[in-house]
Image (tube, rainbow, N blue to C red):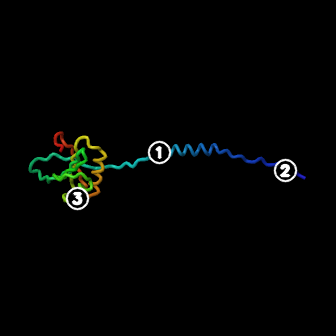
């Protein structure tokens, strides 16, 4: 009769598996982009002399106190200002004048809203000092 030796039990170590999981976690954390970056396009106004055939572009002015001025009509609510802009503006262009020290996110939100409203040509313009309300 042959005696069989008992087979030693196979012991698996989880340490290499955990190491690989942590390396993959670090890799994906480093290559992931957590913010959604996108581009806003706008054009700067060009200087035109008299008789150049340049049409007047409606102006939306942003003030640092949160008010909007669309060719003389003053609004405190952005949705009402944009609704009025859609009624008044017939072409695809608008000039966006911005008072000094206006929050940049406020400008970005306004440009995005104007673009969604169908105004493809948004021209950014900084208000000279002393032209504020």
Q: Position of residue 111 (x, y in %)?
A: 27, 51
In which quadrant will I find the C terminus? top left
What residue is shown with label 1?
31
User: Label 1 to label 2, Cα distance in Å?
Assistant: 54 Å
Q: Callout 3: 10 Å neighbours few (<14), some, many (20+)?
A: some
What residue is shown with label 2?
4
Q: Callout 1: 10 Å neighbours few (<14), some, many (20+)?
A: few
Q: How many marks?
A: 3
Residue at (59% x, 42% y) in the render:
19
What residue is shown with label 3?
86
Looking at the image, residue 32 sits to the left or right of residue 113; the answer is: right
Q: Nearer the viewer, mark 3 or mark 1?
A: 3
Residue at (47% x, 45% y) in the render:
31
On screen, 117 above or below 49?
A: below
User: Label 3 to label 2, Cα distance in Å?
Assistant: 91 Å
Residue at (23% x, 46% y) in the render:
63
Element at label 3: helix
On screen, 63 above or below 116?
A: above
Q: Position of residue 85 (x, y in %)?
A: 21, 56
Q: Nearer the viewer, residue 13 or 82?
A: 82
Residue 23 sits in quarter:
top right
């Amino acid at each position: 009769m042959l005696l069989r030796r008992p087979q030693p039990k196979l012991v698996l170590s989880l340490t290499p598996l955990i190491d690989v999981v942590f390396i993959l976690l670090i890799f994906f954390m480093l290559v992931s982009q957590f913010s959604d970056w996108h581009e806003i396009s706008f054009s700067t106004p060009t200087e035109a002399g008299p008789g150049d055939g340049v049409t007047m572009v409606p102006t939306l002015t942003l003030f640092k106190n949160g008010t909007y001025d669309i060719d003389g009509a003053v609004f405190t609510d952005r949705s009402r200002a944009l609704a009025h802009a859609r009624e008044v503006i017939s072409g695809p262009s608008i000039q966006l004048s911005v008072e000094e020290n206006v929050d940049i996110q406020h400008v970005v939100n306004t440009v995005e809203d104007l673009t969604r409203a169908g105004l493809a040509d948004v021209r950014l313009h900084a208000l000279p000092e002393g032209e504020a309300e």
